[in-house]
């Protein structure tokens, strides 16, 4: 470790029990608990270097200057770390996503988890997974989960609790599951998660029903992981994603993240299950891709079947991966 430099690697995650909605917008606290699997090989590597000659932070993302919104979010995170460490220098941030080309997968979870760890190291703070997770969570709640490997829970936040962090449930080697991502569209989604959640909370008549249902579904997913019971996890996972989307669909105007290929891939997952070709379940985030969950031993068969669905551009296979690593 060199003074003034921090370097870290973190991976994306997929929520098996979904987070949607905030209990405190200022502190970025989720209104419901969520449970995820941290994914190999979808990773981000980030370096933070404190430089006396800088008059502002600089953020280079995938070799290009980041847009102003991304820079603002990175600077807000750095400001928290600088305040804790008593550091006054600005930083040059270089971040690279090692995701399969144009996968269309969100990178904010791995990105902010890696940035939080690298920024703390650059400012001379000792590694502390809980503090790193709480810091990442302020930038993006799903990023709190990527600080830990394997199966991870982010509890719901009580308004005003600035210290909320994720907690690890089981390490990657606990259970050899696989996520098969059916990529259905290139490019960015129309409505980002943060705006989508706010809009849903303000206008969806189903929001309170979602808040009531989500903790019970998280309980089921947590128990299913502990027992390595794929059916228990999978049934609750499908209900969680469909309840989240139902809530967002009922907003005014409704948020529709699905494309025709999304529903076709979802139907294929249910067909594979009903015909007993594979025990597989599906989940969708704030975008059109379908993520199928199955045993690692079924992943090749599930990938082949999903790749044949019209509108599915390609598939990506990911298993449970480790948490944030300092480099
Ligand atoms: C999740 N998503 O649990 C849910 C399911 C998308 C759908 O967490 O506002 O980027 O930055 O806290 O974490 C994506 O939202 O939102 C997300 P902010 P984030 O994975």
Image (cartoon, grey):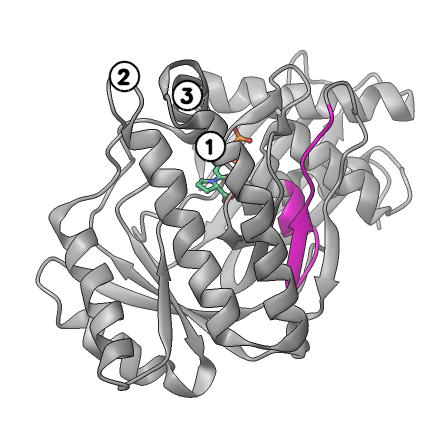
At 74% across and 57% down in the image, what residue appears? 168
**Does the rendering let one see residue 113?**
yes
Of callouts 3 and 2, the N-terminal one:
3
Q: Secondary structure at mark 1?
A: helix
**Any mark on residue 195, and which?**
3
Q: Report the magenta residues as a range.
A: 144-158
User: Does the magenta portion include 149?
Assistant: yes
Work out whether residue 268 or residue 55 is closer to the camera in this orientation and state it. Answer: 268
What residue is disc 1 on? 209
What's the mark number on residue 201? none
C-alpha separation, residue under disc 1 versus residue under disc 3: 20 Å
- In this rendering, which labeled residue sits more in front, label 1 or label 3? 1
Q: Quadrant of residue 163?
A: top right
Could you tell me which secondary element the residue under label 3 belongs to? helix
Q: Is residue 309 above or below residue 64?
A: below
Q: The C terminus is located in which quarter?
A: bottom right
Q: Residue at x 31, y 22 (%)?
A: 251
Residue 323 found in image quarter:
bottom right
Q: Position of residue 162 (x, y in %)?
A: 79, 24
At which x and y percent is residue 140? 58, 33
Answer with left or right where residue 63 lies relative to residue 252: right
């Amino acid at each position: 470790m060199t003074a003034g430099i921090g370097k870290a690697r973190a991976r994306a995650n997929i929520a098996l029990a979904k987070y949607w909605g905030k209990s405190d917008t200022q502190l970025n606290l989720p209104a419901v608990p969520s449970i995820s699997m941290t994914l190999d090989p979808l990773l981000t590597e980030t370096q933070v270097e404190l430089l006396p000659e800088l008059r502002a932070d600089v953020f280079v993302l995938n070799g290009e200057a980041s847009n102003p919104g991304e820079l603002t979010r990175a600077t807000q995170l750095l400001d928290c770390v600088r305040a804790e460490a008593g550091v006054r220098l600005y930083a040059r941030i270089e971040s690279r996503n090692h995701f399969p080309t144009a996968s269309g997968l969100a990178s904010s979870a791995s990105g902010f988890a890696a940035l939080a760890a690298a920024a703390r190291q650059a400012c001379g703070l000792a590694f502390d997974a809980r503090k790193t997770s709480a810091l990442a969570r302020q930038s993006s709640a799903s990023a709190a989960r990527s600080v830990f490997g394997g199966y991870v829970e982010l509890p719901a936040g009580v308004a005003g609790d600035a210290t909320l962090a994720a907690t690890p449930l089981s390490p990657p080697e606990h259970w050899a599951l696989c996520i098969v991502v059916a990529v259905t569209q290139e490019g960015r989604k129309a409505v980002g998660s943060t705006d989508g959640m706010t809009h849903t909370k303000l206008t969806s008549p189903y929001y309170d029903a979602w808040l009531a249902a989500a903790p019970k579904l998280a309980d089921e997913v947590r128990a299913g992981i502990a027992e390595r019971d794929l059916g228990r996890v999978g049934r609750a996972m499908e209900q969680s994603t469909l309840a989240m989307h139902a809530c967002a669909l009922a907003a005014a105007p409704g948020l529709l993240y699905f494309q025709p290929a999304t529903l076709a891939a979802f139907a294929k997952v249910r067909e594979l299950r009903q015909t007993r070709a594979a025990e597989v379940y599906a989940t969708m985030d704030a975008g059109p891709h379908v993520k199928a969950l199955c045993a690692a031993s079924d992943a090749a068969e599930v990938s082949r079947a999903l790749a044949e669905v019209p509108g599915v551009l390609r598939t990506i296979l990911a298993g449970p991966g480790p948490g944030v690593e300092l480099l």
